[in-house]
Amino acid sequence: MFVPSKAAQRGSSSVFALSLAAAGVLLCLPAHAQAPGSTVELDQIVVSATGTPRPAREIASSVTVITAREIEQQQRRTLPQALATVPGLNIVQIGGPGGLTSVFMRGTNSNHVKVLIDGIEANDPSTPNRAFDFGSMLTDDIERIEVLRGPQSGLYGANALGGVISITTKRGDGPPKVTARVEAGSHGTFNQAAGFSGGDDRFNYAFNLAHTRSDSTDSVPPQLIPPGVKVRPNTYDAYTYSGRLGFALTDTLSVNWAGRYTDGQFRSAYDSGFPSKPTPYRALSNYAQAFTRGEVVWDPFGGRFVNRFGVSYSNQDRSNRSPNAFGILGRPTENLGERTKVDWRGDFEIAKGHMLIGGLSYERERLESTSLTASNGNKAGYLEYQGNIADRFFVAANIRHDHDDSYGGHTTYRVAPAYIVPGTETKLKASYGTGFKAPTLSELFIDYRPGFNFFGNPNLKPEESRGWDIGFEQPLFDKRLQFGATWFQNDIENLIVTNTARNSYANIGKAETKGVEAFAALEISPQLRVRGDYTFTLAKDEIGRQELLRRPRHKASGTITWTPMEKLSLSATLIYVGPWVDGNRDFSTPRLKASGATLVNLAAEYKATDKVTVFGRVDNLFDKRWENPVGFLVPGFGAYGGVRVAFGG
């Protein structure tokens, strides 16, 4: 009889899909509504902190896990919506759905967050700062999201100064299953999704299609609109196609593939002049994103030494067109970013509770714009030790060396110990690590001339950080009540900013971010759960002696999930974001105090039959007309409803 090995059953890479071992398991942090009547509570599995699936109680790093069930229950259709309540994050979206979206983690820059989709780095090489645009990603095919906070370059390499957001898509399992969803509502919203999946121990497959459209999102504050000018609303239209395949060839060898393609269009109010003023016309942005990864998993010793050989490729194509004085769109400005990566990773079990992980990789990123074609390569190797002593003391320690074609070698590391106190089961945890962000191709090579007389700097060095945190987590009453807090600090040097002559870039910036993340989760009954999170962040420019932009000092969120009957599920979410420092819409006023806001969202779903579920939600219940960022309104009150069907499975 054919019996798949551990590697074949996992059917995935370190971040690609190993986290699927956690699918369907109850969250301990954050809270997750358990199915009514269930009596078994297992510890949540975390993958991103160490690269392998580990129980959450053994993890010293600060990690938030968001499951597919939570996304479905709260009806979060986009990645920014799914991340909104995560502690330590500030999310800034320009112009509503589809608009450029940045995530600031623990006060670091938006380009200090490394984003992985099924193990594929998604940060865009074609943008000036290599940041990922979170606004373009839909959630229908997402199985789980892990938000790993703190410097992580010791395991993940460049661009992980602030942390890592790892996204794993759904894997097929069980008999063939077909799902479909349709939804409509405010702001001209019309969404559809469909999926086909299945699998067994030898072969699994999952294919998904999602479409979203909103054609009436007002984003310009009324006080900014000149008299007599009629500003048209923003519109967004996008399709996402994704798939995953896994096949166990033998009991020691399996192959896996994941692919994703998104094609979107965003029309937004266009400003002209300086200081700029909104016009009746709209700018047009088109984008196409393709991500794919294939890998071979070889397990010659029954799980004692698992090897993964992978190839990843991403292609992100952006085009922007602005209208002229007559409203006619001009020639497009196009930018193409590509990244190719080959890698090997080996997981070696030294002894029970002790594991050594090693990896090698080579990647090359490429930028193609109307004025330049440039590329750069990087080679890397890393080692990590994971230890479990007496099931009370746990440690993960790693070290990595990168060698870049542009700036040469760079070594980073991280150590993260945790201890479970006998009797009270208090978890004491700490971590210390270093991180770096490589200069982007734009910063190195693009010259803006003759009009702007601004030049790239091929002599730039990486931005560097040192960060630590220390905290505790306390479970009580058989984990029905949990609470904890973590103090963090990051010191960042060699920040790449405009030089004193204002004609190029230089490594002259310096910043410090510090604060506290705290949470409490209460299971009032198996049907009713409450969770609250609070974050205090102080982020300062150490050179200018002033607070960094778009980093609110205070953020809090609360979520209630209630299942009053087996077929009905209700949830309510409150998000408070405090005041921050920002610039105005066109930054003609570079610093001003932006007001905070409190938003409330509601969601409900009812399982009408075994195959049909009806659902509805209200976003921004009290129609808060809040500018985030300044000069751009968040969507007002919105009501949505739809139906979801499933056949087979």
Image (cartoon, rainbow, N blue to C red):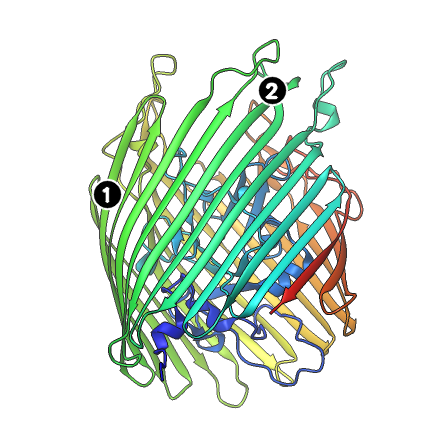
Image point (49%, 47%), residue name: 539
- Estimate how packed mark 2 is, as few (under 14), some (14 to 19) or many (20 or more) residues with alpha carbons within 10 Å: some
At x 33%, y 29%, the residue is 368
Indicate the position of residue 314 as horizontal and vertical percent values.
37, 44
Q: Indicate the position of residue 101 as horizontal and vertical percent values.
A: 54, 41
Q: Is residue 271 above or below residue 200?
A: above
Amino acid carrying mark 1 in the image: Gly
Bin the neighbour count of mark 1 within 10 Å (Cα to Cα): few under 14, some 14-19, many 20 and up: some
Q: Amino acid at mark 2?
A: Asp
Residue sitting nearer the eye, 141 or 451 = 141
**Residue 160 can be seen in this image:** no
Where residue 85 appears, as percent x and y from the top left, is: 62, 56
Structural distance between the alpha carbons of marks 2 and 1: 38 Å
Instruction: Give the label, 2 or 1, closer to the camera.
Output: 1
The residue under label 1 is 377
Is residue 39 found left or right of 527 in the rendered image?
left
User: Left or right of 186: which side holds 202?
Assistant: left
Q: On the rendered structure, is 523 left or right of 154? A: right
Q: Is residue 91 above or below residue 502?
A: below
What residue appears at the point 77 percent right and 70 percent down from the top-left corner? 567
Helix, strand or loop for disc 2:
strand
Q: Nearer the viewer, residue 33 or 63?
A: 33
Give residue 127's quadrant in the image.
Answer: top left
Evaluate whether residue 644 shows in this view: yes
> Where is 185 relative to 70, above or below?
above
Query: SS at mark 1?
Result: strand
Circle 2 residue: 271
Which mark, by number, is residue 79? none
> Could you say which quadrant of the image residue 40 lies in?
bottom right
Q: Quadrant of the C terminus?
A: bottom right
Badge 2 vs badge 1, beta-carbon distance below 8 Å: no
